[in-house]
Image: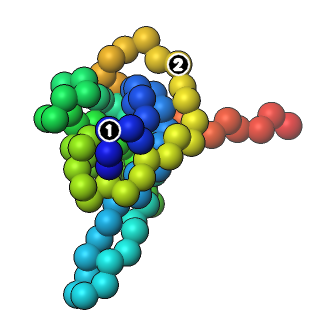
Amino acid sequence: MSDTTLPVLKPGQTIKVHQKIKEGGKERLQVFEGVVIACKHGNSQTATFTVRKVSDGIAVERIFPLHSPVIAKIDLVRSGHVRRAKLYHLRKVGARPLREKKA
């Protein structure tokens, strides 16, 4: 990605990361959608961001370099307001239990 198309990433945002995948001689895009739990090193060449999603009850985290040529596009899905710079506590928090209906 070029520097002009970089979105401002903040913890708490839900984003879609479109990543280029090469399989054989073909190239396709794979989308990874999740919550940004950490952004490190600002906007420098070594900047990274961590995205977490839950797929089929299994939590998956990926660390993406911000300036990687493998990233085709980053879309902002939802913006959340958080009070922490790093949301590592989401690793311990599970899904909210369902409320039981009162008769």
Which residue is rendered at x = 26% and y = 82% of the image?
Answer: 23
Q: Is mark 2 on a helix, strand or loop?
A: loop
Residue 95 is situated, as x and y percent measured from the top left of the image, at 49, 39
Asked whether the viewer can see residue 71, the reply is yes
> Mark 1 highlights which residue?
3
Q: Which is more toward the observer, 10 or 71?
A: 71
Picture layout, residue 90 above or below residue 14: above
Look at label 2 and name its amino acid: His
Residue 58 is situated, as x and y percent measured from the top left of the image, at 36, 54
Q: Residue 53 carries which label?
A: none
Q: Furthest residue to the top?
A: 83
Asked whether the viewer can see residue 34, the reply is no
User: Residue 86, located in which quarter of the rendered image?
Assistant: top left
> Mark 2 highlights which residue?
81
Q: Which is more toward the observer, 30 or 46?
A: 46
Q: Are marks 2 and 1 in contact (CB under 8 Å)?
A: no
Q: What element carries label 1?
A: helix
79 left or right, relative to 61: right
Look at label 1 and name its amino acid: Asp
Which residue is rendered at x = 32% and y = 66% of the image?
Answer: 20
Which residue is rendered at x = 32% and y = 45% of the image?
Answer: 2
Q: Furthest residue to the right?
A: 103
Residue 1 is situated, as x and y percent measured from the top left of the image, at 32, 49
9 left or right, relative to 68: right
Picture layout, residue 81 above or below residue 1: above
Q: Furthest residue to the bottom?
A: 25
